[in-house]
Each structure stands twice: as C-alpha cells, then as structure tokens.
Amino acid sequence: MEEVPAAPNEGISLSALRSQFSVNGEEGPKYGFEGSRYHYGDGTSVASQNSSQILTGYDTLDVGPNYDFYANTNALGRVRRSRPSLFQLHSNIEDSCPPPLYEETNTGRAPGDSSEDDVEEPQSEPTRFGWVKGVMIRCMLNIWGVILYLRLPWITAQAGIGLTWVIILLSSCITGITGLSTSAIATNGRVKGGGTYFLISRSLGPELGGSIGLIFAFANAVAVAMHTVGFAETVQALMQESGASIVDPINDIRIIGVITVTCLLAISLAGMEWEAKAQVLFFIVILVSFANYIVGTIIPATPQKQAKGFFSYQADIFAENFVPSWRGPEGNFFGMFSIFFPSATGILAGANISGDLKDPTVAIPRGTLMAIFWTTLSYLIIAATIGACLVRDASGIMNDTLAMSSADSCQGLACQYGWDFTDCITNRTCTYGLSNQYQSMSLVSGFAPLITAGIFGATLSSALACLVSAPKVFQCLCKDNLYPVIGFFGKGNGKNDEPIRGYVLAYIIAVCFVLIAELNTIAPIISNFFLCSYALINFSCFHASITNSPGWRPSFRFYSKWMSLLGAVVSVIIMFLLTWWAALIAIGIVIFLLGYVLYKRPSVNWGSSVQAGSYNMALSYCVSLNQVDDHIKNYRPQCLVLTGPPSCRPALVDFVGTFTKNLSLMICGNVVTPHRTQCQFNSHVTWLNKRQIKSFYHGVVANDLRTGVKMLLQGAGLGRIRPNVLLTGFKRDWRKDKPSCIDNYIGILHDAFDLQYGVCVLRMREGLDVFRQAQTHGEEPNNQEDFMGVNTMDPDAMVTEPQPQPQPSTVFQSQQGKKTIDVYWLFDDGGLTLLLPYLLTRKKRWARCKVRVFVGGDIQHDVPLGLSSSFEYKHFAAPAITSANLKFRLGFHDVEVLPDINARPQPEHVRRFEDLIGPYRINTAQKDGHVTAEQLNQDCPWMVSDEEIETNKPKTLRQIRLNEVLQDYSRDAAIIFVTMPVGRRGQCPSALYMAWLETLSRDLRPPVLLVRGNQENVLTFYCQ
C-alpha cells in the first residue's frame, strides 16, 4: 500500500488522493476508509489518520502499539480496536481475497468463536478485594485452625520446643515454596476465577488441571464439614460441662453442625462482600484471643494455675521443654509432623477467589507470602511461650504442695516451685500439663472464654473459606466442559457471577459428612488432596521454567525452579508419611481423572507448559537423530501421501494410516494453485483428528501440479524424519484428460525416482474421490483426477469458517476376516513390496488375513544352469524364496511360483491394449510433415512412435499377461500388492507408461497397490 508523506501539522486525507475503496472477501467488506478513519466492514475502527501521522509522519493504515491489540475483552463503554492484518497492509487494493493458504490468526476471532475471557460485561462494578482483605486475612484464617489451639501445646510437649520449631519451619518451608511457585504462576499473565484449578490447568494443561480441580473442589467441600464438626464438638463439650444436652452427644454434634453449615451458607449467598465482613470479624476475634493468651503468660500464676502446672516464664521450664519427651504410639518426629502439617495448609484460600480480586497478579503473591510469614511467626511464638511457662505433668490438686519430708524423693521440675506431682508422674495419672491437657492455652490465657471464642473463630472462618473456595473452583471447572454432566453448575448469578448452584452442591456435600459425625478416616484423604495440589503447583512452576518457553515471563522473580521441584517431591513424600493408603487413593483418583481427560481430548488450547515441553523433546530428538546414520533395521516407510484436501480421498488416507499409525511418518500433501479459493489449514487437521488419523498436513502453493509436488518431495519433513515413499492415487480419467496432464502425472513419478523415493500407486475399482464435483486446476469442470487430489479443492474445506465435514466409511476401516493378501513380488526392489503387507498384517483388522507371495521368473534369463523346464524351475524357486522369507522373519509361508508368467497373452487383450494406446501413436500424417521426430518428441513427449512400441513390446506383453494372472489368482483377495514396472525416461513415453499401469491394474475387484522401492534394501537378515 502506497504511503504519502504528511505535513507535520496538517493531516492529509487519502480520500483526496484516491477514490474510496474497500477490499471484499466472501463475507463482505474486509476493510475500507472514509475520510480520515480506517475501519472494518462492521464499523470497528482500526486507526486514525492523526495517530498514524504522529508515530510515522505518514498517512498510513499501519498503527502503533496499543493495549487493545493484545487484550481479549473490551473495556466497559468502549469498542475494542484491532490491528490491520498482514494481508491488508501489503496486498494490492484491487485484490478481492487473500492468497491461498493465508489464515488470519491474530486479528481477532471469528464470529461465534469463544475464549476463556469471553464474558458479558456486568452492568455494575462487582465487589473486588485488595491483597490484605482478599488474600492475606483469608489465608491466615484458613491456616489458623483448631490444631493451633488444641494440638500445638501437646506437640510442643512431645517434640520439645526445638523440634517443634523444626516441624513448624519445615512445614512453612513447604508451604513457602508452594507460595513462591503460586506467585510465579499467578504473575505470568492475567489470572481469572478458578484459583488452584485455573493456575494448574493453564500451566500443565487440562489433563492434570481438570483432575486436581475436581478433587480440590470436593476436598474443600468436605473440609467445610470437618471444620464445622470441630466447632460443634467444642460447643457440645461446653454444653456437657454445664449439664445441658439436646438429644445425645453424637446427635447434638449433628444438629449443631447442620445449623452451623446452614448459617454459613446464608452468609455465602448474601454475597462476597458480606462473607468478607464475616471473615474480618473472625480475624479480629482470633487476634483478641492471641493478645489474651500473651497477656496471660505475663500475669503471675495463681495457686490454682500452679497446681495445673503453670508457673509463668521460667528459664528452667524452657530448658527442660526444649528437648523432646516422646510418649504414646505417635511419639516420634514424623508422627508429630503428620499431626501438625495440616495446620500449615490453607495458603491457597486467597488464590481460590482470584476472580474476586482487584489485581490477582499483585494480591496473590503479596497476600499469600505475608500470610505464611505471620502465621509461621505466630506458631513459633506460641510454641516458645507455652513451653517456657508450663510443665509437662501436673495433677491439678491443690494439696500436692511440696512437704519438707518428701523433698528428697520429689520428681519433676515443679519441685523447685513448691509442688510435688510425683504420684501422678509415677502412676501416669496426671490430667494437667502440656503432655496431658489439650486446653493448655485456655489455662495460660488471662480470660479462658476468649480462647474458646478464638477456637470458634478459627473453625468457622476456615469452614466459611472452604465453603466459598469449593464453588468458585468448581464453577471454573464446569465452564471449561472437561467432564460431562457438571456443566449445569457452571452458571453464575449477580454482578459477581456467584455460583449459587455450586454453593448448594457444596452445602449438600458438607451436610452429608456432618451427619456422619466421624471424620477421622476422611481427614487424611482430604489432607492428601491438598498436598496433591501443592505438589502439582510446584511441578507446574518447575516444568514451565525448565521448558524455556518464551511465554514463561513471570513478573515475580523470587523463585527457583529447583526449589519448586524440591517442594513437589517433598509434598509427595509427606502424603505417604501422613497416611500411605490415603496417598494411594488420592493418586489413584488423580490418575483415573487424568486418563478420562486424555481419552476425551477436550478441544481447549491454553498454551500449557506440557505443550512447550513436547516441542522441546521433539526438537531435541529430531536433532539427535542427525548424529546417527540410518540403519536398515530401523527403516520405516515414511509416506508422503498426495491426498489434496484429505477429506476428498478418505480411502487413500485410511489405507496409509493403517500401516503408519504409531509406526512411521505420514504427511498428507496438497498443492494449491494461486487462483484457487483460500484454503484453511486447521480444517484439514481437524478432519484428520476426527478420523483418528495420525498424520501431518502440508499444503504448498504452486503454479502447476508437478511443480508443487516437487516442492513437497524436496521440502516435506524435518531432518531424518522425512518421507521416503511417495504414495498417490491412480489417475482414472487419463484417457479423457489433456495429454499434458498425463505427462505431468508420469513426470511426478519420475521426479520421485530421481529423489530416491519409493513410489506406490493405489487403485480402487470404485475410485478414491468422494467429491465427484471437485474440479482440477486448469481443467474442465467435469474432469476428475482420482490419482491425488492435490489440485482438487474440497468445497467444505474452502469456507472461511471450518464446517463439520463428512466422515465417509471406506473398505480399509472394516474387518477383513480370513481373506488373502496377495503379494506379486515380481522384481527385487529392495523389499518394500514385502514390507508393506507385513506391516498391514500387524494391525488388528488385517491380522486374520493370509499372505500369499507370488514370484515369477523369465525362463530364458532367470533359470539357473541345469534347470531346463518350468516344472524344475518352480521346484527350485519356491524353496529359495521361502528360505529368504524365513530369514526375513516376515511370517509368509505360502509362496507360489508363476513360471508361465511370460506366456503370450490372449489376442483380444492385446487388441484392447492397442486400442488403448492408439490415440497417442504418431500417425502417418505427422510423420510426413515437416516436423522432425526430435521436435515432435520435445513438443509432445506423450506421443508414442512405432519404434518405441517395438522396443518396449516385451514389457507391454508382460503387463497384459500379468493382468490375466491377477484375474485368475486374486479375484477374491482383500488387497493386491504388485511390483510396479519402471519406464525408462526418454525411451518410454508417458502415454505408454500410463497404458502399462492401466492394463496391469484394470478390471480387478480388490484394491491394487503398485509398489516400487528405490532399489535399496529395506529388509535384512542380520542383527547388526
């Protein structure tokens, strides 16, 4: 497009220099301009004249960088702009359509296409949270739980202050590494709703992301019941102390639990804003309980508290409690670690509501890491303070003061402070102290009911966070349609897109587990589900880093890929340390869900690190193959199949796909001429995938068919992974087509031989082309080229929008039963004629077929000295060929020799061949003209002279006779493999060669494959 200089302060309108124009495609105007505004046909502005002048000094369609060009959503109240396409920038104004093989991929999506960012703009601004209220407070509340209040003092008594710190720091290191990995993933692009599922699925792909998303949502729903039961048990214990009861202890827990979950559901349904206010209230209650505890440690101990083992801060108590004192079956380091570690989880509570955050890329890293820091510090302080002022054993009896007479026999550190707990220590009947009382924090605190309030706040806040997280994660999973049925729960309501249906489902699951009222068996499984998520988040970060994908550019830099890998490994180890059978169950469920998604193969593309890793591995292996020479043992027929649009030649595609699937390379080649309609690459690949054909598609643009095939022969493949066999269809309409097309067809075969390709030609009685109305390039509309289709355009494949294309059935898709595969190994081409049927029999559909090998010989040339008859030759040749087959280990034991293959064919078949070649013979008028034979051969290379007929007469008679043999022996075969004759360039005109192929394969019911290797060995006897 021509550019016109513009004055610095004065706009120049192109409309004054050119007439108004537009470029039209099939769907209407693609772009145009009026005045100084460029626009698409739908009115969307591309660029303004003034902005282009400011950036370039020219009035041009090109535009400067703009945020809208990279965003997938529109700003509220503003029309999204798109950059001009490459076709619009560099094509001629008069061009009405893009060139063949051109596809626009970055100028916006086509109508009706969807994306993960395609959401309707809300009418009002939804509630959004910052990093403190949305992430830090939520994570801290989810991390703090009943273990902090009821188990941390007991763990300190068992492991001692020193090892308790080790347990806390080790747990925090794991969660900290996971937090760093989460921060890196969350800052590598825009994060939407879905939390953990969104992060894993967009990093590792839908397979692992979907399985983790499902079990993580379920684990959160069950965790609601766990925390609620913890709250209900505390309330029931208080009621029991006061002598109150509803029914009985178990049913009291159920009633209180159901009421509590219902209240939490009401808070959730009220909206995220009310839920956030409730979380802030719980947070304040917990902070007050902490302050109450710290004040209690400073207040001097009363005699009642001293009788229960509390003596305020004492250096001796700190020193004694610093070392471990293991008791009971769980008295070991890993036992204590398994009990404490679940209290360190909950770091994903903020990430799980990523869709409700103002800026997730800032809020998730900052809030998550700050929550880990403050909760770790609180755990360390509580473990140190309670271990410095409370002894391990105390009786709680006021009369157990130290008497002067028993001072020498007193046991325990309490003796130094005037108390004698020797009896309960010796008899192990102490009911107070760090080792014996779970409510030690209530004893130490200044006002015990505030600790109970803290327990209530911790349990209810964790339950509320899980009740919100589960539906949010599940909603995102449902919207992705990875699993059947669950899509019903993906619908959102209100300005925050609240998953009301998901809330109800989570409520039902929670109530079911609350009614069980015994979650000791379920709890380890839930912990393992959370650890699965941690392991995969860490592995996601490691995998994304190790693949070196240019798309991995997290703005959060404080992470290490090796630390992420360590976090993943340690998370898996901890799963088995907690409960090995629960770990196996969790991993089994993940594998099952992973297998389902792998089987279904959902049509999603999120640019996962698995894709990047696959590319790296493929590239590495391709390069490594160049370092080793090819070996006969590793030979594979790598096929370049001239299919044209693959949907035009389904039989050809199915046949080659049968023996190349999971074995070797298959490339479907297509030659598109410049004047043809635009061809969509993706539509052909989609058709192949739907048909479950493992093949590549390669399209080229060329002025004519033969030039395009030359390009494919020389350019297809990569390194050692490149085609070595050309496979095409037989040209059925050659007698009706232009002679030049015959010459091009035979020229393609010669070109393949020149490039050391093996050549195969498939002919079927019913033909290969399922689209009989398809046109060849430059030919009459009624002509069909059944041999390839590289120049035949499939109407369904040419539309701008890929449409569902038909999947016709072919003979190669059905079971072949106990038919025969007849192989006519007439000439030694290196073994390709034998290798292809062997590969076919390895497939289930052809496994029951019997392979018959027919060999023939020229009595005048091939009979060894001393064998004077066909009978003697047959008995000599059959064992020799059988022995060769045994050495090749092909399993072909039925070998038949055709000694009369060179017998004279029937006269009527000879006359039929003469009628076939007659229109292409040089007649007398042409001979008597002024045109020399050399000039005639140069201008019309397909014409056949009498000399050429006579020179090639033995080969001609052989093809006629061979067709008679095929009619006699292989009329009922499943498929026939025949060694293809080779016509010498310059001595065998293209029409004569075409007549040979026609005669050899005509009037046969089974499919016929003419095979000719490149005369190099593809089979070997040897092991090296």
Image: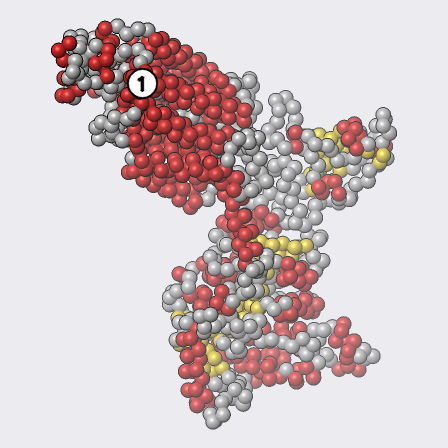
In this figure, which residue is indicated by the disc labeled 1? 318
| Residue in the image at 56% along x and 42% along y | 548
x and y percent of residue 526 in the render? 33, 30
| Residue in the image at 32% along x and 16% along y | 315
For this view, does 47 lie left or right of residue 275? Answer: right
Task: Name the residue nearer the viewer: 818 or 89.
Answer: 89
x and y percent of residue 640 in the render? 57, 61
Quarter holding residue 424 = top left
| Residue in the image at 42% along x and 62% along y | 843
Three-letter amino acid code of the residue under disc 1: Phe
Q: Is residue 506 above or below residue 756?
A: above
x and y percent of residue 694 in the render? 50, 54
Task: Name the residue nearer the viewer: 594 or 170.
Answer: 170
Q: Is residue 153 above or below residue 475?
A: above
The kind of secondary structure element at disc 1 is: helix
Task: Name the residue nearer the viewer: 647 or 449.
Answer: 449
Q: In which quarter of the image is the N terminus?
A: top right
Neighbor class of circle 1 (other Cα within 10 Å; few <14, some 14-19, many 20+) is many
For this view, does 878 lie left or right of residue 617? Answer: left
Q: Please say whether residue 688 is visible from this viewpoint.
A: yes
Q: Please say whether residue 243 is visible from this viewpoint.
A: no
